Amino acid sequence: MRFCVTEFSALAVIVAMLGSTVGCGGSNGPPRAEVSGYVTFQGQPVPVGTIEYRPNAEKGTSGPQVTLVIQDGYYDSDGKGPVFGHHTVKVSGYTGVEVPFIPEGERLFPVHKDDVEIVEESYTINYDFPLSNEG
């Protein structure tokens, strides 16, 4: 049996298409937790910001990094939260008033770093800056 180049190319395209529908992501991806909460600065909602969950490979956690958007003091993973396990978390907050080269505005507080372990399906985590341990 002989394959010509066009038959081989067509077969390769079909295999690639099938491979793209199976595997990571979608409902077949790793289980994820739902996280949401409020972020305030000096008692007021943080206008804009981000919360990043980075799986901590040194503690055995693997999976995608998740970045959640803070808008008017609230964030919600909306079905795309972090995988279960240990994570390094970074919280950033901004004024929301655009300045040259910084569309999100000036930073309200230094980037807050934390280590968390996600073990439950749903979390509410609130941050109020400045944190009491920041002085």
Image (tube, rainbow, N blue to C red):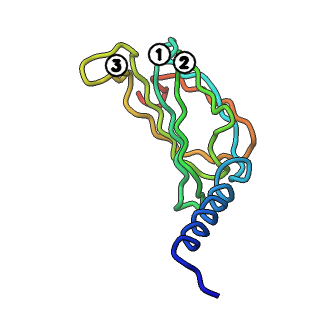
- Marks 1 and 3, the one that precedes in the sequence: 1
Which amino acid type corresponds to the residue marked 1 in the rendered image?
Pro
Residue marked by disc 1: 47
- Dot 1: what SS? loop
Q: Secondary structure at mark 2?
A: loop
Check the image and report above or below for 7 versus 52. below
> Residue 128 appears at what percent x and percent y?
53, 22
Query: Quarter of the image holding residue 60?
Result: bottom right
Left/right placement of residue 42 relative to residue 36 reads left
Q: Nearer the viewer, residue 76 or 45?
A: 76
Residue 5 image position (x, y, % from top left): 51, 75
Q: Looking at the picture, which amino acid does disc 3 mark?
A: Gly
Q: Are marks 1 and 3 in contact (CB under 8 Å)?
A: yes
Few, some or many residues within 10 Å of mark 1 (<14, 14–19, 20+): many
What residue is at 54 percent from the left and 69 percent from the top? 9
- Residue at the image point whose x is 51% and y is 47% from the top: 88
Most extreme residue toward the bottom is 1
The answer to whether mark 1 and mark 2 are in CB contact below 8 A is: yes
Q: Is residue 11 above or below residue 79?
A: below
Callout 3: few (<14), some (14-19), or many (20+) C-alpha neighbours within 10 Å?
Answer: some
Q: Which residue is mark 2?
A: 73
* Residue bearing the label numbered 3: 105
Task: Please tell me how crowded label 2 is: few (under 14), some (14-19), or many (20+) other residues with Cα within 10 Å.
Answer: many
